[in-house]
Amino acid sequence: MRNNILGGLVIFMVVLTCLLMLDDISNTQEQPSIEDTAQIEQAENQTDLAIVENEE
């Protein structure tokens, strides 16, 4: 009896995983990707100073 419950649970999880993968594959909407850009500027007399600006 216990082996049947564990086997059923394993089969259920495998089927659920396959259905979720099929849903992700069939979803063709492209979501906009957010890219973080960093700009490094060098100050006049400071060679070890970097300024990082993030734009969202």
Image (cartoon, rainbow, N blue to C red):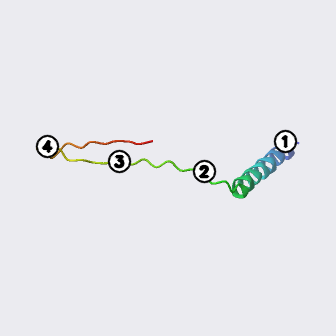
Name the residue that disc number 1 marks: 2
Residue 49 falls left or right of residue 2? left
> Where's residue 36, x and y in %?
42, 47
Mark 2 sits on what residue?
Answer: 31
Disc with the residue nearer the chain's start (3 vs 4): 3
Q: Which residue is mark 3?
A: 38
Residue labelled with disc 4? 46
Mark 1 or 2: in front is: 2
Q: Amino acid at mark 1?
A: Arg
SS at mark 4 in the image: loop
Q: CA distance from mark 3 to mark 1?
A: 57 Å
| Coordinates of residue 46 in the picture (x, y in percent) | 14, 43
Local packing at callout 3 (Cα closer than 10 Å; few below 14, some 14-19, many 20+) is few
Tell whether 32 sits left or right of 14: left
- Residue 21 position, x and y percent, is 71, 54
Please give left or right for residue 49 compared with residue 21 in the image.
Answer: left
Residue at x 10% of width, y 44% of height: 45
Distance between the Cα atoms at labels 1 and 2?
44 Å
Task: Compare marks 2 and 4 and give the one earlier in the sequence.
Answer: 2
- Nearer to us: label 1 or label 4: 4
Lower sequence index among marks 3 and 2: 2
Please name whichever residue, 47 or 43, is drawn nearer the observer in this view of the structure. 43
| Mark found first going from the N terminus, 3 or 1 | 1
Q: In whole angstroms, how far apart are the C-alphas of marks 2 and 4?
A: 41 Å
**Label 1 Cα crowd, 10 Å radius (few <14 / some 14-19 / many 20+):** few
Q: Residue furthest left?
A: 45
- Badge 2 amino acid: Gln
Would you call the spot at circle 2 few (<14 residues within 10 Å), some (14-19), or many (20 or more)? Answer: few
Q: Dot 4: few (<14), some (14–19), or many (≥20) neighbours within 10 Å?
A: few
Between disc 1 and disc 4, whose residue precedes?
1
Q: Amino acid at mark 4?
A: Gln
